[in-house]
Image (cartoon, rainbow, N blue to C red):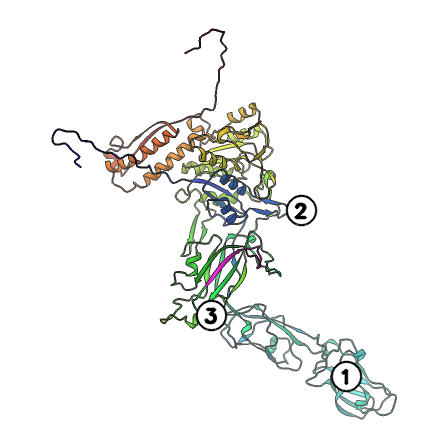
Amino acid sequence: MAETLISPGVLARESDQSQITSQPIQAGAALIGPTVRGRVNIPTLITTYSQYQATFGAVFESGSANDTSEYTFLTSISAYNYFQNGGTSLIVTRVASGSFTPATSSTIFNDQESGAVTVGSNLFGSYTSGGSNGALFENTATPTTSGAGASIVLAVTASSANGKISSSAVLPAVTVAGAAMVAATYASVPLIGANNLGTGATATVVVSAPTVIDSITINENITGSGYVVGSTVSLPTASLGAVGAGGTDPIITPVAADFFVETTGVQVTTAGTGYAVGDTLTVAAANMGTPTGGDLVLTLVDANIVDGNAFTLETFGQGQIMNSEGGLNSLGALANGTTNNLRWQVTSPDTGSGTFSVIIRRGNDTSRAPAVLESFNGVSLDPTSPNYISRIIGDQTEELRDAGTADPYLQVTGMYPNASRYVRVKSVNFKTPNYFDNSGTAKPQFTASIPLAASGAFGDAVGSILTGTGKYYDKITAQDSQGLVGGNYTDAINLLANKDDYKYNLISAPGLVQSSYSTPLNSLVANSENRGDNIVILDLELYNSSITATVGTAAGKDTSYAASYWPWCMVTDPDTAQRVWVPAGTLIPGVYAANDRTAEAWFAPAGINRGGLGQVVMAERKLTQANRDTLYVGKVNPIATFPGRGVVVFGQKTLQTQASALDRVNVRRLLIALKNYISQISDNLVFEQNTAATRNIFLGQVNPYLESVQQRQGLYAFKVVMNDSNNGPEVIDRNELRGAIYIQPTKTAEFIYLDFNILPTGAEFPA
């Protein structure tokens, strides 16, 4: 169609302005606080409360010996109310005291030998020992080996409980009364135990005179047993050539040193590496406390060598609560299994295809009634395969670097993004690259690498939330907030200062109050001021404080990037069903979410229509009009209680001291929303040509958006200037692009005056 007129006429042109204006990427809320499980100091995006529970848990028991009550952290209550009121995205950062690590899976066995001797393996019986008196070993010994192994240590035990008298024993010489013996050496003379204690042993007896026995030694290769230290044994005189009648058999009392001591156990205390079936372990006799005995020689069999660990899983959750190891009961339940930890299961191993399935189950289920959280079917150990276990489950983890500094950061390790919500692949110990040969047959050197069908638990995690002294709900003190102190929040607050990585429009740390934990909260507010894209929900005082103290604490803050609410409120904990006291800031993110769901960010999150706290049982204090006046003048938003209306947020001031449009929450949140969108538009223009075309792209997106905000009652008027007037040659030469945005924010009707005028009959009403 022609766009110009050459001869006289009329040209009708089209200008399509019906395109849908692109909307900003929406940012949600952020919470910092303790949780039952999850990764410490790793900001995590959550989109539902059920996902929150799966990631961070909910209920725990106090660590106090005198208190077994169930608790939840304020973080959980705040998250629940946020999602319950329409919130759609929440960044949760867990904080904790001390070191926390994830749990790792118990051995996932395959049929490959690992080369390690099993710790606790009893090698007794697989050895030869010289010396008729056996060996009395030291507690531990390091053997020499015939194989390539190293670092193995044995704990060897011995016992005389068999009741054998040693062949090296020399029993005391005795005088035989009332009998005459021929001087001679007598072999195979039986030892008769008193009271039938002991039988079968024979001795060699040397007689030097008719009534004198010079020596008694036990014969080699004795078979007797059952003798007892301190019991008596006798030599029958008839066996000693005694003549005449009335002779008395000689009596001998063996002592402990006379008894045969033999090895009863050889256990591995340090596994070592590099061992194979058939290797021998030799402990020199000189190291066994019996230099006259022979060396102890043990030959390793298949049962002594640990089978291979095909791969290792690691939980995302950190802390001792993730440890589920502890054995199984008759129903196949883990002794330490709970709703907060996990167990693993390998099913359907197929050496023909090189595949198997990995199932993650809840820690407190049973074999008869498994609670499957997620499953990954047909995975393999072949890194060249598309179903490689690390690729399917994921193997990435984030580690906090430069902790304790003003600029901590997260470093990602691992190759594949995590598909599992609960675990990652920590290591694959027996990879099977190119599992099949050219004919499509599994290579025999790889088939033993496939894990066996089995199930197991997780263990070795450290870190506990149960300090035994934690103060919760209304018992929070200036020294203990849910088992934590203010310094435990530092790294999380500094991490969330990163505007590029973490997008949110409001943030709170339930459980911290300004009067007792000013250092971390001041940092939190400073971050929001520097970022310019969020507002802090700030609690001011502990439970059972006064209006005077609350207003006094508020007076010490001057910022439009924070708002405070008072008093505390009683709610029903969604996970324990107990009624508990919480600071008002725990609930305010939910109020903001409800406001944004039913209206817009620039509407006041307050009043009967948008400030209702339906989940609140009652406020700590019913405020009078005078109380509310005092609080509002002092920059604190009252939590009011109205008959028939319930508990309501009845104020929307920021903590800014100077009177201006920004001393109201709705205006601050309007600016946050506008800056958020316009900044996203501007990001796309960085490094573009500073020309009229680029400026028109900006104006073509910003003006329609501001018009939509105006239509939605956010602005009275606006104007955007980005042209030659503010982008002259000197600006362009500095590689700058300048824009000026003028807005008139709408104001809320917080003070409504109604004049009732009584007129006489017949009077005219004013125009």
Q: Is residue 203 above or below residue 615?
A: below
Q: Is residue 361 magenta?
A: yes
Above or below, 9 relative to 690: above
Residue positioned most to the right: 246
Amino acid beneath label 2: Asn
**Looking at the rendered structure, which numbered label has been put on residue 448?**
3
- The picture places residue 692, in percent across and down from the top left corner, at 24, 36
Residue 66 is tagged as 2
Q: Give yes or no for residue 535 being in the magenta stretch.
A: no
Q: Does residue 37 appear left or right of residue 89 in this picture?
A: right
Stretch in magenta: 356-371
Q: In x, y percent, where is residue 344?
A: 52, 59
Q: Which of the numbered marks, if any, corresponds to residue 92? A: none
Q: Which residue is mark 1?
A: 191
SS type, badge 2: loop
Q: Earlier in the sequence, mark 3 or mark 2?
A: 2
Q: Tag 1's secondary structure?
A: loop
Question: Does residue 136 appear in this view?
Answer: no
Q: Residues within 10 Å of mark 3 (few under 14, many from 20)?
A: some
Q: Please, what is the three-letter code of the amino acid marked with disc 1?
A: Leu
Residue 321 lies, in percent from the top left, at 56, 52
Does the image show residue 105? Answer: yes
Q: Quadrant of the N terminus?
A: top left
